[in-house]
Image (cartoon, rainbow, N blue to C red):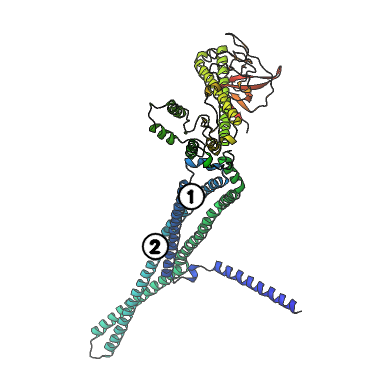
Amino acid sequence: MLALLASGLSRSSSNNKLAESENSAQNSNNMSWGTELWDQNENLAIHTNRGIDALDKFANFLRDRVAIETEYAGKLRRLVKNYQPKKKEEEDNEFTSVQAFRNLLKEVGDLAGQREVVSESLQLQIIAGVTLLSKTLREDRKKCLSDGATLQQNLTTQLSSLDRAKRNYEKAYRDSEKAVDSYKRADMDLNLSRAEVERYKNVMTSKIQQSDDAKNEYANQLQKTNNLQQQHYSMLLPSVLNRLQELDEKRTRGFREFIVGAADVESSVAPIIARCMEGIVKAGESINEKEDTFKVIERYQSGFTPPRDIPFEDLSKCDPDSVQESHYSNSTSNHLTIRGTMSANKLKKRVGIFNIFGSNKQRQIIEACITMKNSLTADGQKEDFSDLPPNQRRKKLQAKIAELTQNIAQETKARDGLMKMKIVYEANSSLGNPMTVEGQLNESEHKLEKLKVDLKKYQGFLEKASQVPTATSSPQASRNQLQNGHRTSRHSNGSADDHHDDGDDQPDDAGSLSSSSASPESGLGTSHTSLPGSGQGSANENAIGEDTYYETEVETLNPVGKCRALYPFEASSEGSIPMSEGEELQVIEIDQGDGWTRVRRENNSNGWDEGFVPTSYIECTLYA
């Protein structure tokens, strides 16, 4: 029972509060400045001025915030730029921690971009709107105050006229009263003549008339004043005050909208900032210490075996020569760097110590230094990377072979495009002179031949590096060999062997290379062309003379896009198809750099009809 009573009381109290809020809202809607504040004109003028000043203060706040946002974004961008990895640090990009830091810098750069977006949006949308609203409000307020001042001046003028009429009426009434009293005294005075009494009577009559006129003027001015005052306080002044009220409400409403708008600008970039934060977290989570440890091992692993135990040297059983030789071997091993070779500075000092007219062994050392200098690459390493440890050497050679293989594939593709262009030009001389591509074709052929020679050379280096025993490549093993009295001549790769010329491993530059290959990129099937100066063809190449031929291989290709013919084209060479202006075709092979595109049309009589058309004659749209 008590619970029901309490619930009823709570419901009734909530209903009462709701009703009170509704009544207050309704009353506030019915109330206006014109009726409630009819006598507070000056205070309302001060209030509206302060409101507009508050709006201007908000605009200044936004300007300062925009300056801070812009400065913050600029400093973030400079921070990202200052901490970008240097070129010398690019080799560390394989580590997950370095990759994560680069991703972090990227996300911070995106954060800077979002701060710039906030700054620009606040400047263009909010600050511009606040400035325009403030200017409009000041102009409207000035006009309202001017109209109110005019109304007040009119009312003041009318009140002055009423006061003046009242004073005139009071004076005229007093004068008339005096004139009446004078006439009565004169009329009762028997000593005065009839003419003098008549004169007093005329003065009385005149004063009474003036009093009546002043009374009528006062009544008239009073009526006009009352009418004007009623109109002023019931219509004219409330209208001006209501305009001031609307102006102030417009300012207040704009204040609300601009604050919400500024928050919306910030909220609009919040999802992107959240994604940046997710990217930073993802970058941090991508760091794998085990993977970085493995990469450190992979980078610096030499492939050498740990040194064996140093044998005990019994000086009582060794002759002095062997002791000196042992000291020599120890000093030699101290000059070996971590790559197992003698440093170039030590070699230069060694050459400077001995005179050039010394023994043959010294001349051999000088010649070896010169040869080693000439075989260095641009980054200071040897051409065969023999100055690296075995594992690092094999990785370098494998990377070089992969690079050469990719270059050969690209050059082969370019060569096939030139050959196809030459064939097209030979078939249709109106399209171009075949001799214009002859020089480019020869240059491409020689470049391709050089790349293949280099590939074979580095493949020989890799095969040779794979056959070198790693145990004998250790500097400690060399030291042990020298301590045991075995003096051997060593290569820069650390293997103990006799000197021999690496030139035997070089392939013959005059060897034959294939002039062409049946590649899908050429678009000509298994076509082969013999070029002047290209040498003897390979075993896989058909021997041909000056005549050029190609075989068309039937192949079903899916369309990669569509095209529209811009100009009519008459097929005058084999492999090309005619087309009319505006005709739509399917693209089954894009231009490979030779100026021709392979297209297909649906022919009702022969089914699918396909061939090559000039690329400049069509407008292509490729599928996504």
Q: Residue 145, percent across and down?
A: 40, 63
Look at the image and tell me in which quarter the N terminus lies.
Answer: bottom right
Left or right, 419 with reference to 248: right
Please identify the residue farthest to the right as the structure is shown. Answer: 1
Instruction: Report helix, strand or loop for mark 2.
Output: helix
Camera-side mark, 1 or 2: 1
Occupied quadrant, residue 307: top right
Please name the amino acid that badge 1 sits on.
Answer: Glu
Residue at label 2?
146
Q: Residue 595, percent across and down?
A: 55, 21
Residue at label 1?
116
Is residue 209 something that shows in the picture?
no
The residues tagged by marks 1 and 2 sit, at their Cα atoms, a distance apart of: 44 Å
Please name the amino acid that badge 2 sits on.
Answer: Ser
Q: Residue 122, percent across and down?
A: 48, 53
Q: Crowding at label 2, few (<14), some or many (≥20) Cα neighbours within 10 Å?
A: few
Occupied quadrant, residue 171: bottom left
